[in-house]
Image (spheres, rainbow, N blue to C red):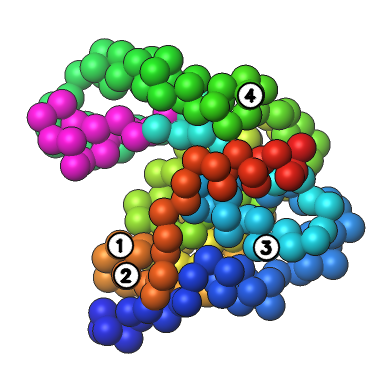
Amino acid sequence: MMQKYKHMLQDREDAAKKLIDIMPMQKFKEEEWHIVAVSKGGLELGRHLKQKLKNPLEILFLEAIMAPHNNECEVARVSETEEIVLNESLINAFEIQYDYIYGEAHRKHEEDILSSIYQYRKGRPFPSMQNRVILLVDEGSETGTKFMTALKTVLNQKPKAVYIAVPVLPRDVLEVLETFVDDIFFLYDIDDYVETDLYYKNLEKIDDEAIENILEENR
């Protein structure tokens, strides 16, 4: 089963082209959907999705909060507007105190997110999405927490509509996300999802300069 999906996408550009085929691009253009990437890879994908169109492209900075004694295990995530999404079942299973989560969320916001905002956006805050049509994008989704944290952030700002575009994601994550958005554009929903880079032949790490350039182009 795993072999079936291995390297089925060349790279982010290939994934974007295939998403464009299934997206309502006329609506995307006319309603001037705001593309909001939920990761650095998502920003690169968003750049290919937008092509030469005038749609605004932005990144929402998020940081994972790990379990106290296991830095591989994500138990929550915080956004740059300090929205937090918790993985209740893991928090309960590990008997993690909520004080720890909120303390870590504050620390990650102060240390990591604020420095990203200054580095990549020259200190500009995330723009208001009130009454806008939003397209959240990422190159893949393993647990759905990036999208859930981004959704919590943008829904608080009272947008007109929210869509998601993601080339690959687990089937159970798709089912959860579908209940929160107007529509999801995806290429593959996979039962036994492993990790996103398995599904791409080439998923290059995106360097700081590339991120700064993409955001600069879109200002």
Q: Distance between the residues labelled 1 and 3?
A: 22 Å
Query: Quick check: is 161 in the magenta stretch?
Result: no
- Which quadrant holds residue 141? bottom left
Q: What residue type is labelled 2?
A: Leu
The numbered mark, 4 or 1, whose residue comes first in the sequence reads 4
Q: In the rendered view of the protein, which quadrant contains the C terminus?
A: top right
Which dot marks residue 81? none
Query: Quick check: is 73 in the magenta stretch?
Result: yes
Q: In this view, does 163 lie above or below 56?
A: below
Residue range highlighted in magenta: 64-78
Q: Which amino acid does label 1 sit on?
A: Glu
The residue where tag 3 is placed is: 49
Which residue is nearer to you in this view: 140 or 157? Answer: 140
Answer whether labels 1 and 2 touch (C-beta < 8 Å). Answer: yes
Q: Which amino acid does label 4 sit on?
A: Lys
The residue where tag 4 is placed is: 122
Residue occupying image coordinates x 66% and y 56%: 47
Q: Distance between the residues labelled 2 and 3?
A: 21 Å
The residue where tag 1 is placed is: 195
Which dot marks residue 198? 2
